[in-house]
Amino acid sequence: MQKDKMIYEGKGKKMWSVLGEPDLLIAEFKDDLTAFDATKRGNESGKGALNNKISTEIFKLLMNAGIKTDMLQSISDTEQVVKKCEIIPLEVIVRNIATGSLTKRLGISEGKILPFALVEFCYKDDALHDPIINDEHAILLNASTQEDLNYIKDQARKINEILKPFFASKGLNLVDFKIEFGRDKDGQIILADEISPDSCRFWDIKTGQKMDKDIFRQDINGGSIKVAYEEVLKRILG
Ligand code: C5P
């Protein structure tokens, strides 16, 4: 499997085409950290490798539970081979506990356990700062159809129902997370991108300690995420 051209560089990953394999891509996880619409930037050696390992384990768990994803295999510490798909320009956010932008937007108290898993959509557009949108906006913007949105919401809730008890068994509250979906060459909607402490919030069940990118966002422990991400990986594997 040989990397050819870099076709895209995002905040957390570089995507490469693969020589002689038009239906595959290599995702390379970067050590860069960004927050607040990339106005805060950092870098921590080893972060890309930790996220690659964590995301690989979570995707494996989901695939074993019947969720279709783009992931094929991890090929190095920081790289995995994925099925090429057309990313649907929506960030799908699932929330179990109120924090972050939800508390700011709606005045819901920090830490309130939500009576049901709340699914939200943001429109992936850097120039517009990824605004929160509803189903009708997504249809208006040709991002998706209502049928596909219903499927995506259903998949997002299923993923939450798999991950919430899994992380609880590891002593972590899955507070919220962001996922993305793509369409593969057959038009099937599949889970894509990554699920890692960059894109989830994990709170230790016993201590309430934050074990995710909020450490960087809020400069907890000098903003260094490594110890917490290593602990998340250790618990996932343990
Ligand atoms: O900031 P907010 O509270 O809306 O974030 C909700 C969840 O989505 C968090 O787990 C956060 O890490 C994730 N998120 C993300 N990428 C974004 C926005 C949010 O991974 N661009």
Image (spheres, rainbow, N blue to C red):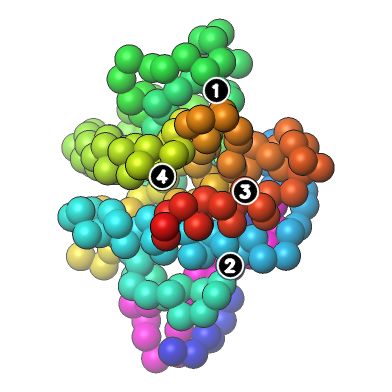
| Residue 78: % across, % down | 56, 72
Q: Quadrant of the C terminus?
A: bottom left
- Mark 2 and mark 4 residues within 8 Å of each other at the beta carbon: no
| Residue 12: % across, % down | 61, 57
- Mark 1 and mark 3 residues within 8 Å of each other at the beta carbon: no
Q: Quadrant of the N terminus?
A: bottom left
Q: Closer to the N terminus: mark 3 or mark 4?
A: 4
Q: Which residues are magenta?
A: 16-33
Q: Which residue is mark 3?
A: 228
Residue type (three-letter) at the residue carrying disc 1: Thr
Numbered label attached to residue 83: none
Q: Which residue is mark 1?
A: 99
Of the two numbered discs 2 and 4 in the rendering, the one whose residue sits closer to the viewer: 4
- Mark 4, secondary structure of its residue: loop
Q: CA distance from mark 2 to mark 1?
A: 27 Å
234 in magenta? no
Q: Which residue is mark 2?
A: 49
Q: Residues within 10 Å of mark 2 (few under 14, many from 20)?
A: some
Numbered label attached to residue 170: 4
| Residue 206: % across, % down | 51, 30
**Badge 2 residue CB within 8 Å of ligand 1:** no
**Badge 1 residue CB within 8 Å of ligand 1:** yes
- Mark 3, secondary structure of its residue: helix
Q: Nearer the viewer, residue 236 or 161?
A: 236
The residue depicted at 38 percent of the width and 55 percent of the height is 58
Q: Is residue 193 left or right of residue 212?
A: left
The residue depicted at 37 percent of the width and 85 percent of the height is 21
Q: Residues within 10 Å of mark 4 (few under 14, many from 20)?
A: some
Q: Nearer the viewer, residue 83 or 137?
A: 83
Q: Residues within 10 Å of mark 3 (few under 14, many from 20)?
A: some
